[in-house]
Amino acid sequence: MDTLVIDAAAAITLEDIAEQAERAKAVVSQVRGRMLAPNARKKPPTFSTAQLMVLTGLDKSQVDYRLRKGDLPGGTLNSTGSRREFSLAEVRHWVREHRREELRPERAEAITITIGNFKGGVTKTTTALTLAQGLSLRGHKVLMIDCDPQGSMTTLFGLLPDSDVEIEDTVLPLLTGKQAELSYAVRPTYWDGIDLVAAASFLFSAEFFLPARQSREPNFEFWNLLHYGIDTLRPQYDVIIIDTPPALSYVTINALMASDGIIMPLPPSALDFASSAQFWDLFSDLTTQLITDRGGKKEFAFIDVLLAKVEAKDHAGMMVREWIAAAYTDKVLPVEIPKTMAANASSAEFGTVYDPSPEGSGARTVKRAYEAYDRFVELIEDQTQTFWRRQMEA
């Protein structure tokens, strides 16, 4: 038998790995600095009068009347007076005024939605942020909770997890018992109407702390910490969206148990489909052990499967879509998020299709992605309104 010989000169030490980590962090910082210049912080889009009309459902004469009346933000005219622009905050003011019946009833509380999947790269974080942005453009106030130690959601908000986020900005003090509720970690973001609880790599420690505490305290319910921790926030928001790591971890279980609805983004590939089946199988086993066998009960307002990264001419993908439809039946949303260069470009610039100003969104592929996400947001808003109505009837 031949002996495997390893070149000692090529060996990689722990010091090499540390150096590599520092180099990668430096490059990420440089990239973010270029993408988010000049202040390494993101800026919200601006909106034309035409876009305002679409979002509010008003026609030109109605918008002109409210501008003359002066009771709503008037935007800013350009130097020639030929064009009016509205900030995101101004647009949301108009939308909330003209969509009052679609907004959360006063006595209802926020719906909590978790975005989950075993696999990475299935657009969980993009789906979560796009949903939050789309709902905010419809007038809703949204809280984003980043539960992924990789901090991808946090990064999309223009923050570097390793340098801009402290332990007190995350869910970790809640999970360790140092805080009883989560309001301590809420911060505003560049996007009016969306607040954030950030994440960073030290969230990994929860995966060791929670089982250790469970073994020491027989009556401790690790899976309910986030559920109870957001109780004081539910009356303050319309929607709470939780982004999870690509694993059925202790933190993910907390997110799922805190949620009223679950959305699984699922690309139509054989491996992603097989992984999704494992996710639900393990989730079912866990809920049986943690809830059902203890005499408890847990209900969800909805569980949705969102077809994502769909390529129209992918024949293998068409077959997998049939499998997904057979497996998940009416849980599959009647919208497909296309895989487009526009969406990839937005992601590369730490954004989504909602981040560019509307004037920069004229390309056909951008329009296709934008319309698909708009339809997705509309469907989730419909389910959210049904949830609120049931709250009011209870």
Image (tube, rainbow, N blue to C red):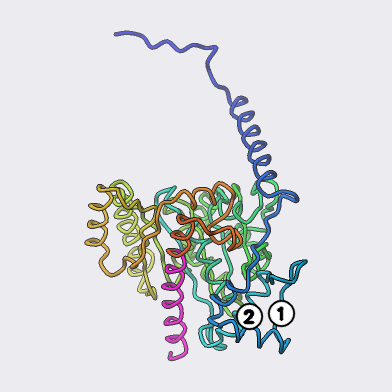
User: How many numbered badges does the structure rendering display?
Assistant: 2
Marker disc for residue 73: 1
The 10 Å Cα crowd at callout 1, few under 14, some 14 to 19, many 20 or more, is some
Is disc 2 surrounded by few (<14), some (14 to 19) or many (20+) residues within 10 Å?
A: many
List x then y, in percent, for residue 152. 56, 51
24 up-or-down from 113: above or below: above
Q: Which residues are magenta?
A: 373-394
Residue located 52% across and 55% down the image:
210
- Which structural element holds mark 1? loop
Mark linked to residue 94: 2
Residue located 41% across and 73% down the image = 379
Residue pictured at 52% horizontal, 88% vertical: 101
Direction bottom: furthest residue = 393
Q: Amino acid at mark 1?
A: Pro
Q: How far across and down, in percent of the image, does residue 153 sit?
A: 56, 55
Give residue 233's position: percent from left, percent from top.
Answer: 60, 74
For residue 147, side relative to residue 89 (left or right): left
Question: Magenta span has 380?
Answer: yes
The quadrant of the rendering that contains the C terminus is bottom left
**First in sequence: mark 2 or mark 1?**
1
Mark 2–mark 1 CB contact (< 8 Å): yes
